[in-house]
Image (cartoon, grey):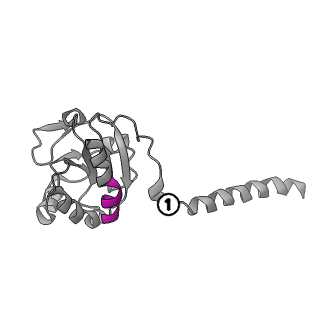
Amino acid sequence: MARYLAPLGIFAILVAFFLVGLQRDPRAVPSPLIDKPAPTFRLPQLHATDQQLSEQDLRGKVWLLNVWASWCVTCLQEHPLFVDFSREKMVPIIGLNYKDQRDAALDWLLKRGNPYDISIVDADGRVGIDYGVYGVPETFVIDKQGVVRYKHIGAVTPEALRDTIIPLIKKLQS
């Protein structure tokens, strides 16, 4: 009988960890990149594949990096919000087109509007991995020194933009 108690106890502990994990908000996963330099990249631009962009090109500016793809259903939810926000020209919005087909991405932007100052192509997903992308969409706020200050997992909502992202941008720009 005693030999069954140890495995039963281990099983009970595992079930407890599982139940605690189910109570957590998956969007609240802290990013190890917060307050650290943004990962380096040099990627081709979606609209001009002969031109590249790197994070160094954005030094001195507060900017948003929005990870998106034409195959991403959730990206459809936040896209109109970014189209509207881009009209304010508050910050450069850089699109990181993640594991996508170029023609599909171009068509998607043509049909839905293009909120991005520049969209770059991460065809193999390596830059997304460097940024710790769990899934698409994800959005990062990066400061003038190239330090990641915020990560939003999932579709950005009007409330998240109004209550968190815009105030942070204004604070970082001052």
* Principal secondary structure, stretch drawn in magenta: helix
User: In this orientation, which residue lies closer to the viewer: 88 or 80?
Assistant: 88
User: In this orientation, which residue lies closer to the viewer: 150 or 125?
Assistant: 150
Tag 1: residue type? Asp
Q: Position of residue 38 (x, y in %)?
A: 33, 37
Q: Which residue is mark 1?
A: 25
What span is colored magenta in the figure?
158-165
Task: Work out whether residue 51 can be spotted.
Answer: yes
Q: Position of residue 132 (x, y in %)?
A: 39, 45
Is 20 on the left-hand or right-hand side of 106?
Answer: right
How many numbered discs sit on the rendered protein? 1
Task: Work out whether residue 125 can be spotted.
Answer: no
Is 167 on the left-hand or right-hand side of 42?
Answer: right
Q: Position of residue 119 (x, y in %)?
A: 18, 48
Under tag 1, what secondary structure? loop
Residue 151 within the segment the image draws in magenta: no
Name the residue rendered at 23%, 63% in the picture.
Answer: 81
Name the residue rendered at 47%, 52% in the picture.
Answer: 29
Badge 1 density bin: few <14, some 14–19, many ≥20, Cα 10 Å: few
Q: Position of residue 126 (x, y in %)?
A: 32, 41
Name the residue rendered at 11%, 38% in the picture.
Answer: 51
Is 137 on the left-hand or right-hand side of 2?
Answer: left
**Among the 4 quarters of the image, the one containing residue 145:** top left
**Among the 4 quarters of the image, the one containing residue 74:** bottom left
Name the residue rendered at 17%, 56% in the picture.
Answer: 86
User: In this orientation, which residue lies closer to the viewer: 2 or 165?
Assistant: 165
Quadrant where the N terminus sits is bottom right
Quadrant where the C terminus sits is top left
Is 91 on the left-hand or right-hand side of 159?
Answer: left
User: In this orientation, which residue lies closer to the viewer: 5 or 134?
Assistant: 134
**Among the 4 quarters of the image, the one containing residue 41:** top left
